[in-house]
């Protein structure tokens, strides 16, 4: 039976969705069958990685929650797009304002019904014909009905945070109040770490020990490098230019290119630990 992975964070801006897409793509490049579900219903961004011609054809995850649309009908096959030996399917949420308002203004009872749907989706995706080795769920930051539902389904939760006092304090409170009660395996991923901390193994070990003491939980995953956010800023500039040029620039999946070696090496270490577990 495949594993269910949730990516979560205390607040936005941690690189959660970028991490989600690259981890899923790396697993597919290694030959695994992977499904990504976009459950960040209030601020979705996975669509920004998808070729526009595919987005216009497929229904959205919102449609599976609100209408008589199967989750299978929402899945786009990106396997050829990333040239992987495995399989990569993506189900995205709508980024249209009216769709976001419609799905986030529902009652607590309606959100509770989403939980049973999500469990059923995962069971379906781990069976024929998808036979997913991994279902990766990108959920909304903070404590919301959607994030609670997503975490409740997970075998493993990757929690991303920046090495800032407010991020660490908020993440620790969220872990104490939510994740430890829901019982999934927790893996912490510090992101956008200042490069000055990462010059050598002694510095890396020092910051790792400080974070482990702060959280009093588990073993911190290998640090993702500060260059990750710099690359994101470069892509943002490209996206702005593409709008001016009226071209169709999509966000890059880093693991499909040798250009982003520092990020890819860090994610490779993290992915190998996942596969060993």
Image: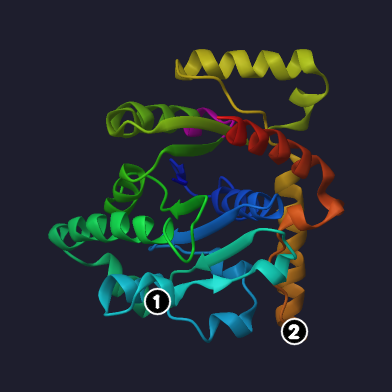
Left or right, 100 with respect to 51, comes to: left
Left or right, 96 with respect to 81, comes to: left
| Disc sitting over residue 31 in the figure | none
Residue underneath mark 1: 97
Distance (Cα) linking label 1 and label 2 = 23 Å
Q: State yes or no: residue 163 in magenta.
A: yes
Number of residues whose C-alpha sits closer than 10 Å to that of mark 2, classed few (under 14), some (14–19) or many (20 or more): few
Left or right, 8 with respect to 53, comes to: left
Left or right, 108 with respect to 56, comes to: left
Can residue 164 be seen?
Answer: yes
Residue 115 falls in which quadrant of the image? bottom left
Please give the name of the residue rendered at 44% of the width and 75% of the height, measured from the top-left corner.
74
Position above or below: 146 against 269: below
Residue 118 falls in which quadrant of the image? bottom left
Residue underneath mark 2: 247
Magenta stretch in the rendered image: 162-167
Please give the name of the residue rendered at 20% of the width and 66% of the height, measured from the top-left corner.
106
Q: State yes or no: residue 237 in magenta.
A: no
Secondary structure at numbered mark 1: helix
Can residue 192 be seen?
Answer: no
Secondary structure at numbered mark 2: loop
């Amino acid at each position: 039976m495949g594993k269910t992975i949730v990516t979560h964070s205390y607040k936005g801006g941690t690189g959660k969705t970028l991490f989600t897409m690259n981890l899923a793509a790396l697993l597919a490049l290694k030959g695994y069958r992977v499904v990504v579900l976009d459950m960040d219903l209030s601020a979705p961004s996975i669509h920004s990685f998808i070729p526009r011609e595919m987005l216009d054809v497929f229904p959205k995850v919102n449609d599976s929650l609100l209408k008589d649309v199967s989750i299978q009908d929402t899945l786009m096959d990106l396997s050829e797009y990333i040239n992987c030996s495995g399989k990569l399917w993506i189900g995205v949420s709508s980024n249209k304002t009216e769709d976001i308002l419609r799905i986030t203004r529902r009652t607590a009872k309606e959100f509770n019904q989403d939980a049973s749907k999500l469990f059923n989706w995962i069971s379906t995706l781990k069976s024929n014909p998808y036979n997913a080795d991994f279902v990766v769920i990108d959920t909304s930051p903070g404590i919301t009905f959607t994030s609670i539902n997503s975490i409740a389904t997970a075998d493993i939760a990757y929690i991303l945070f920046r090495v800032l006092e407010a991020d660490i304090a908020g993440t620790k409170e969220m872990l104490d109040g939510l994740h430890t009660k829901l019982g999934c395996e927790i893996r912490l991923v510090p992101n956008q770490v200042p490069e000055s901390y990462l010059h050598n193994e002694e510095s890396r070990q020092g910051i790792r020990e400080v974070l482990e003491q702060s959280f009093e939980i588990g073993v911190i995953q290998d640090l993702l490098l500060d260059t990750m956010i710099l690359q994101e800023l470069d892509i943002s500039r490209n996206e702005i230019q593409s709008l001016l040029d009226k071209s169709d620039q999509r966000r890059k999946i880093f693991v499909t290119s040798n250009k982003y070696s520092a990020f890819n090496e860090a994610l490779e270490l993290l992915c190998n630990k996942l596969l060993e577990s």
